[in-house]
Image (tube, rainbow, N blue to C red):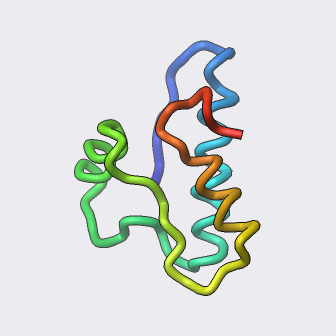
Amino acid sequence: LRFIFRGSNSNQIYFFRWSFGVTLYEMFERDQPYADLSPLQVINLVSKAQLQPIPRGEWSPVIQTLIQQCCKFNPQDRI
């Protein structure tokens, strides 16, 4: 997932948290989340809170939880 972020400095931390979660996903999965969807589909589904990176492999529960916490739909809920 590659997004261009345009927002206030106060919102950047939420964007960075989401990006960190997606980066972790890519590192452990060795693939992009939603690789089978077009970029437009991904943006549309993520913006409607219908899509979140879900670990597919046998990952540590700590990593799974961290990714899920970083990629919550509501930015204020992200760790």
Residue 37 in picture, x, y percent from top left: 26, 64
Left or right of 64 in this view: 60? right
Which quarter shows the C terminus?
Answer: top right
**Is 67 above or below relative to 72?**
below
Instruction: Tell me residue 49's x, y (percent).
Output: 36, 41
Which residue sits at x=67%, y=16%?
9
Nearest the viewer among 51 and 26 is 51
- In the picture, measured across the screen, residue 61 lies left or right of residue 31, that is right
Residue at point 61% right, 27% down? 76
Q: Considering depth in this image, is 45 or 2 the residue closer to the camera?
A: 45
Task: Residue 59: name its quadrant.
Answer: bottom right
At which x and y percent is residue 48? 30, 38
User: Which residue occupies 45% across, 66% down?
Assistant: 33
Disc tally is: 0
Residue found at the far bottom of this picture: 58
Query: Image quarter for residue 77?
Result: top right
Give how far across and how far down residue 46 sits, in percent. Answer: 36, 45
